[in-house]
Amino acid sequence: MRILFAGIIARYPFGGVTWCSLMYLLGLRALGHEVFYIEDTGECVYDPVQNTRAIDPSYGTSYINASLEPFGLADRWSFVNYDGAYHGRSRDAVARYAADADLFINLSGGSWFWRDEYMRIPRRVFVDSDPAFTQLAIAKAEPWYVDFFQRFDRLFTFGANIGTAASPIPVGPFTWHKTWQPMTLDDWRTRAAPRDRFTTVMTWQIESFTDVGGNKDQEFVKFIELPARTPQRFELAINGPQKLLRQYGWDTVDAMNVSRTPWGYRDFIHSSKAEFGVAKQTYVANRSGWFSDRTECYLASGRPALVQDTGWTAHLPSGEGLLAFSTMEEAIAGIDRINGDYDRHAARAAEIAREYFDASIVLPKLLEVACG
């Protein structure tokens, strides 16, 4: 198939966001499909050098190219600036590609426009990486927002409980199909020796969806005293209150610097002993079943993960390699279990990544539903 894929690499030019789109592109290509990346959000890019939203998109466009070029995709992208100017491939080139495309995949709002060339693609799907937030926003949204989602043929979500009796989130007339972030496993294998640190990469509070849900800070404070309860050391790559967290015994580094490139983000994960991850309050309170693409990267790297339960335990194995917690006591017990037989948990982490998140497994299932 010929696939037009919309993502948010320049809008959020950091490693974790980049890998999300990149692994869709690489995974689809490995299955024999032709891919082209488009970014058309109508928003200015974030420029981390200037630490601001920038009218000039040159940082974002250079970042897209630097991320895609090593994989032979330097001529397979286009960025539409807020003013309508096309960078990378031209508008005519995008229109020609779309004219023969079979499928349009929109990840996380990689385009908020329904241009004629997108609408003419026979099959159109949206992949929701913010389950619960997205559905709550639709439930209270203006008509244009509801209409935006109605124009897709299929809707997918990383929230495995969305639309089921396990979660109270309203879905209205929409059907949300479960999917996971596809992992291109060869890009995550490593022989690097980990440091003795449980880590994660996190944002304390997000800018979007502020009117419909709670952020990670509301959950993290429940576990803020964890370093005092265990000899295990932790390191947070965080965009948040580093001084406060250090007072409670957390080692911190700046998340934006760690994630400045896809390779820096990957190196940080590879250097970690395991992940300790807390979820956003809305994911937890609504039992969304959300599972983090970041956690998948730890698992694919052979790094165990101890992450807060959002309801994902009904869909994925928990206990070896991947462990769930909801209370402080469960978090402490999980740390002890991983440290008690680290090699076994590391091996099982990699097995779970192969069994559940391999792009060669995830993407054919998505395509079957998308085109069915």
Image: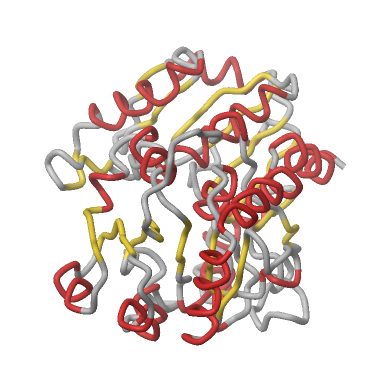
Report the side of 225 relative to 329 (left or right).
Answer: left
Q: In the depicted view, which residue is nearer to us: 59 or 217?
A: 217
Residue at (49, 30) in percent of width and height: 38
Task: Please provide percent x and percent y for residue 97.
Answer: 60, 17
Residue positioned most to the right: 372
Residue at (54, 30) in percent of width and height: 187
* Residue 246 position (above or below residue 92): below
Q: In the depicted view, which residue is nearer to us: 1 or 117?
A: 1
Report the side of 94 relative to 155 (left or right).
Answer: left
* Residue 77 position (above or below residue 352): above
Number of marks drawn? 0
Occupied quadrant, residue 49: top left
Occupied quadrant, residue 139: bottom right
- The answer to whether residue 339 of the structure is visible from this angle is yes
Report the side of 355 relative to 287 (left or right).
Answer: right
* Residue 60 position (above or below residue 350): above
- The answer to whether residue 143 of the structure is visible from this angle is no
Task: Please provide percent x and percent y for residue 216.
Answer: 39, 73
Residue at (50, 87) in percent of width and height: 329
- Please identify the quadrant where the N terminus is shown: top right
- Please identify the quadrant where the C terminus is shown: top right
Occupied quadrant, residue 69: top left
Task: Please provide percent x and percent y for residue 87.
Answer: 35, 21
